[in-house]
Image (cartoon, grey):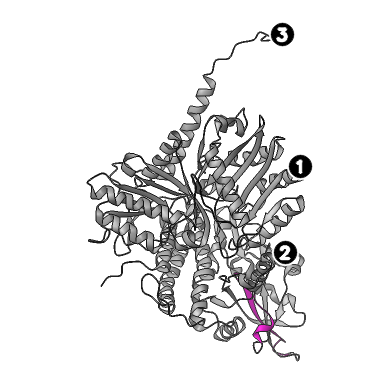
Amino acid sequence: MEPTYFNRELSWLRFNERVLWEAERESLPLLDRVKFLAISASNLDEFFMVRVGGLHALIKAGSRARDLAGFTPKQQLRQIKSQVASHYDDQYTIWGTLLEPALAAHGIRHLQMSDVPEDARQLLHTYFTDELAEWLNPVAVDPEQPSGFRIPGRTICILLDVGPGPHEAGTERRPVVVPIPKGVPRFIRVPKTEGFQFVLIEELIREFGSDLFPNEIVHASGVFRLTRNGDIPVQEDYAFDLTEAMEDVLTARKFSETVRLEVPKGTPRALLKTMLTLTETAKTDLYRVPNLLDLSSLMTVAFLDGFDALREPPWEPQPCVALQDRSVFDLLDDQDLLLHHPYDSFEPVVRLVEEAAEDPDVVAIKQILYRTAERSRIINALIRAAQRGKNVVVLVELKARFDEARNLERAEELELAGAQIVYGLKGLKCHAKALLVLRREAGRMRRYAHFGTGNYNESTAKLYTDVSYLTARQDYGRDAADFFNGVTGRSQLLGLRKLFPAPMHMKKRLLDLIRFECDQAAQGEKAEILAKVNSLQDREIIDALYHASHEGVKIRLMVRGICCLRPQVSGLSENITVHSLIDRYLEHARLFAFHHGGEKQVFLSSADWMTRNLDKRIELMVPVEDSSCRAMLLDILRCQFKDNVQAWHLDGEGTYGPAISGQKEGFRLQAHFAKQAVARAADAQRQVADVLEMHVPPGRDAS
């Protein structure tokens, strides 16, 4: 009997295969292909840290629990390792046979030290002696006591076999590990060469490493890179102070068990044995790669200066013309505003916070921060608002994976400025995207709200596709106020008028909406569901969609990454189609539309259709009722299924193939939205220019 669901982990690996395929796509400019190769490697790093690390922990705990597809943790790990081996082969084939030779033809060339001209070699030696050597910290290690020095994860390390020369007396040979410090460039430009010809920093260290050990020599050397388990949960039941608990997690993550050791093929057996011992790695977690360790570092090459011709021209975010000569508050008094990022600039959202910080009539700002930019204007504005005596309440999610340290640091700054900080919630990660500004106008309190599908991060707002909804509708504002009070006060969120928070109400509302479509189909009426999510894994939602398909509901899903639902299976899901899109921007928006008897129900949300989002996180689903904004959202959703250039189609066997939209000409979704945003801004600018202004002669006033 065929399984009803796909395995989550294998589905994710298929997603990363689609990312990797972009590196193979000849229609893309060369450096964009390099970028996708680097992204696929970075994705794989996180997969090992989190998903493989989590499976290791389950196996260690003796768990034999089965996932949706019926696999135990051990069975999942075996299948993952088989798939990853194939994934590595594809990555290095693309790099070694396609991208590296093409880069060399354009002057971006990796030189071996033996190929570096003598005069350039001397300059590199001087650079090593005068600058690089001072950065390095060689550590002699004892293989008999490997826990004496914990080797950092996701860091290129050089293992040196150091000892006296062949004709010299002295101490015995010993292994020395040299981790490459952060901040040191990986790709070192070779002096007196054209283009960008480079050597790797580990090659310099191996070449000139003997300089670090007076009166000794390096007999042999090798490089390695390990990945540690990053899936370390906070033990909240025993944590009286969550900030202290998160600091403990960050420390533990540095010293957690190894889940992967990468070494180049051809590493001498004696060195490899030492590497395995020092890193306490099982042979089953060893991965031999053909050459360059850490393909994610190729992102540096992808963004080299001086090679713009090898990249696709940028699509500039379009400004909000309606805000040229007025404040955000004035605009929202007149209309709701829907923004489609990054085609529409994120600036109006930033301006809402900055104007609120400066406006003397604003009395309070409440916001949830999950992942923020490194130099965040939003946080800086919140700090200024608190310093001016405004009531600033910020829920900072300390459990935002891999952003915990930054969130801790910025939370302390906000607290010092006088903001009230709520450090997440016990047992629930707060992933909702919400901002509320309270402003006193004509003796009454006016509320301005922002709801989004993405983070308050000015950097990723230029790279991720998301949707922002800004409104001064008071029923939305009151709900937002109740939502913040409920979250910070840890009370039940009852009686909300518009918003559907998880884990309290969102899943129930989704299931009710799906059931309504089933009832419509059973009565012979039109029934349709359109949804765009990053991941689909929740069993209740999947089963409800299967039932809806059986009843005749037409369901079209755009699922970027993990999809555990099997589409187009006779008797199960023949009315469900699943597409996936990989393109220049990371698809990130969560949007849902239900035909609902012709009275279309349209929502944006912070939540994917995963159990962790719907049952274990604070999330928001927000209906969009404004006719103009709703029409724009529906257009965004409908266009998802037209792409026949970058989109993929999932079949019932779990195989992805190029999507066919029925269009005679190529339709590239993201390019379409970029052009649409330019046209929308130009049209708005023309409307502004068409407003007649009275001509006033010089020296005269208009009174």
Under tag 3, what secondary structure? Answer: loop
Quarter of the image with the N terminus in it: bottom left
Q: What stretch is highlighted in magenta?
A: 145-167
The disc, 2 or 1, on the residue closer to the chain's N-terminal end is 2
- Residue 388, numbered label: 1
Q: Mark 2 points at which residue?
A: 127
- Determine the residue positioned at 71% across, 86% down: 165
Quarter of the image with the C terminus in it: top right
The image shows residue 685 at horizontal and vertical percentages of: 52, 26
- Residue 699, numbered label: 3
The image shows residue 351 at horizontal and vertical percentages of: 63, 39
In front of the other: 509 or 226: 509
In front of the other: 339 or 279: 339
Q: Nearer the viewer, mark 2 or mark 1?
A: 1
Callout 2 amino acid? Tyr
Q: Is residue 205 visible?
A: yes
- Asked whether the beta carbons under mark 2 and mark 3 sit within 8 Å of each other, the answer is no
The disc, 3 or 1, on the residue closer to the chain's N-terminal end is 1
- Residue 82, numbered label: none
Q: Nearer the viewer, mark 3 or mark 1?
A: 1
Q: Distance between the residues labelled 2 and 1?
A: 50 Å
- As displayed, is residue 368 above or below residue 84? above
Q: Is residue 245 left or right of residue 214?
A: left
Callout 1 amino acid? Arg
The disc, 2 or 3, on the residue closer to the chain's N-terminal end is 2
Under tag 1, what secondary structure? Answer: loop
In front of the other: 321 or 552: 552
Q: Nearer the viewer, mark 2 or mark 3?
A: 3
- As displayed, is residue 80 above or below residue 192? below
Callout 3 amino acid? Gly
Under tag 2, what secondary structure? Answer: helix
